[in-house]
Amino acid sequence: MTRLTTLVDAEAVAKRAALQIARELDSARRARGVAHLALSGGTTPARTYELLAGELTDWEGIEVWFADERCVGPEDEQSNYRLARETLLSAAGIADERVHRMEGELGPETGAERYARALRARVPAQDDAPAHTAGDTGESEAMPALDVIVLGIGPDGHVASLFPGAPTLDADAQALSLGVHDSPKPPPERITLSLGVLRAARSCVLLATSAGKADAVSAMMGEPSRHVPASLLRRGRLSVIVDDAAAPPPPLGMSTG
């Protein structure tokens, strides 16, 4: 079941998220010696990253990945990597070799292929992660399991760069990273983790603030649908942290007090 936490405002959401992410990373690192964190762009995650930089005092053993990226260079104002660098990476002193950015400047297909290879090489699989069939051998190969993926949600219910009804939602089961050519939000070309990788993660922390996200959050909490990609996340491993404005209405018959 999805864990939903409702807080008074965006600052409270960022504080709670930073604390939870820090705890989960520390737990993963103690359990396996390394923890893998994937970041998204957006205003609410940005404040979370600023707080997270100080919440976790020791960043040794933390590997940083990205949920999606626009096909721009790393210094571009639209770059998710640049946002992460300015809010978290520099402040936390995370070494460059432990930051695995999506190379958007290479274009959707080449960038996605390179990212898939990096994920497969460095991120171990979880024992119960969904498996796919590798090549023609018929052998099953488990998906890489990121420890924590930080996600936002669009007003249309998209997560990462997986948009409603998009072909990327029907990608081959072995796909780890996908090129996007027709994003409804500019720029049209992007790179995104696949739905399979999002579902294989040990934890997804989804943040939403403002009334403009309320309908999307409500739809996400409803029945799974390709029209609301966030609803396809693995709910038993999903934490949703929202402010009062973005909170879904209580079930019918329940008093709000």
Image: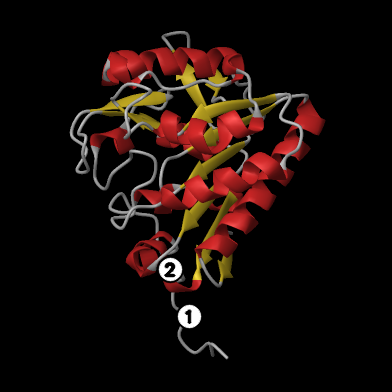
Q: Give, as a three-letter code, the residue at label 2.
A: Ala
Q: Nearer the viewer, residue 54 or 5?
A: 54
Residue appearing at x 24%, y 35% in the figure? 167
Q: Is residue 60 left or right of residue 255?
A: right
> Which corner quadrant holds the C terminus?
bottom right
Q: Which residue is mark 2?
A: 246
Corner quadrant of residue 70:
top left
Q: Nearer the viewer, residue 42 or 138?
A: 42
Disc 2 is placed on an element classified as helix
Image coords of residue 135 (percent x, y): 42, 10
Picture layout, residue 154 above or below residue 136: below
Q: Which residue lies most toward the right here?
A: 30
Say if mark 1 contacts mark 2, CB within 8 Å. Answer: no
Image coords of residue 131 (percent x, y): 53, 27
Q: Which residue is mark 1?
A: 251
Q: Give, as a three-letter code, the residue at label 1.
A: Pro
